[in-house]
Image: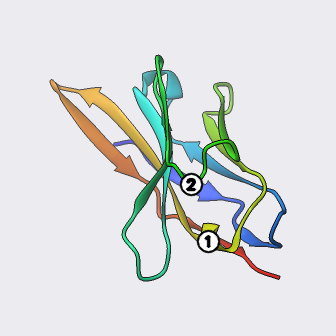
Amino acid sequence: QVQLVESGGGLVQPGGSLRVSCVVSESIFSINTMGWYRQAPGKERELVMTVTSSSTNYGDSVKGRFTMSRDYGKNTVYLQMNSLKPEDTAVYYCYAQRYTSGRNMDYWGKGTLVTVSS
């Protein structure tokens, strides 16, 4: 069972930057896909970005503004968010997928709230 714990959410002004973190309970070398999703009030959960060893997928609304990085020594994944807009306000969820016992298993954190407002 992979556990994901997000932190770093908060209030930021439009145009500002914020970095959120996700600590993974196991070595991220064992994880096939790491990424982030978000859910705004009254909306469905949507893709922010996911990263595998060979590809990166972005949600259309964040391309060019958000980047993801990984610290393998700390088993931590970061989402750097720049040029934030009010419509980026959402709960941000860390996501991991690992291939185990013949199938892909999905894991989710509990989320961290990011509010973009003046």
Amino acid on which disc 2 is placed: Ser
Q: Amino acid at mark 1?
A: Glu
The residue shown at (47%, 23%) is: 55
Sequence-wise, which precedes: disc 2 or disc 1? 2
Q: Measured from the top left, where is residue 41 in percent x and y?
A: 48, 81
Viewport quadrant of the N terminus: top left
Cβ–Cβ below 8 Å for labels 2 and 1? yes
Q: Quadrant of the C terminus?
A: bottom right
Image position of 109 with respect to 103: above or below? below
Q: Is residue 1 above or below residue 29?
A: below
Residue 71: x percent and y percent? Answer: 68, 29
Q: CA distance from mark 2 to mark 1?
A: 9 Å
Q: Which residue is mark 2?
A: 61
Indicate the secondary structure of the residue bearing disc 1: helix
> Seen in the image, is 11 located left or right of residue 104?
right
Indicate which disc residue 30 carries.
Answer: none
Which residue has dot 1 on it? 87
- List x then y, in percent, for residue 32: 40, 26
- Residues 27 and 95: in front is 95
Q: Position of residue 36 (x, y in %)?
A: 51, 49
Name the image quarter holding residue 104: top left
The number of numbered discs placed on residues in the rendered structure image is 2
* Quadrant housing residue 68: top right
Nearer the observer, 35 or 57: 57
Element class at badge 2: loop
- Residue displayed at 46% across by 25% down: 52
Taking the image as shown, residue 104 lies to the left or right of residue 15, namely: left
Which residue corresponds to the image point at 46% horizontal and 17% vertical from the top-left? 54
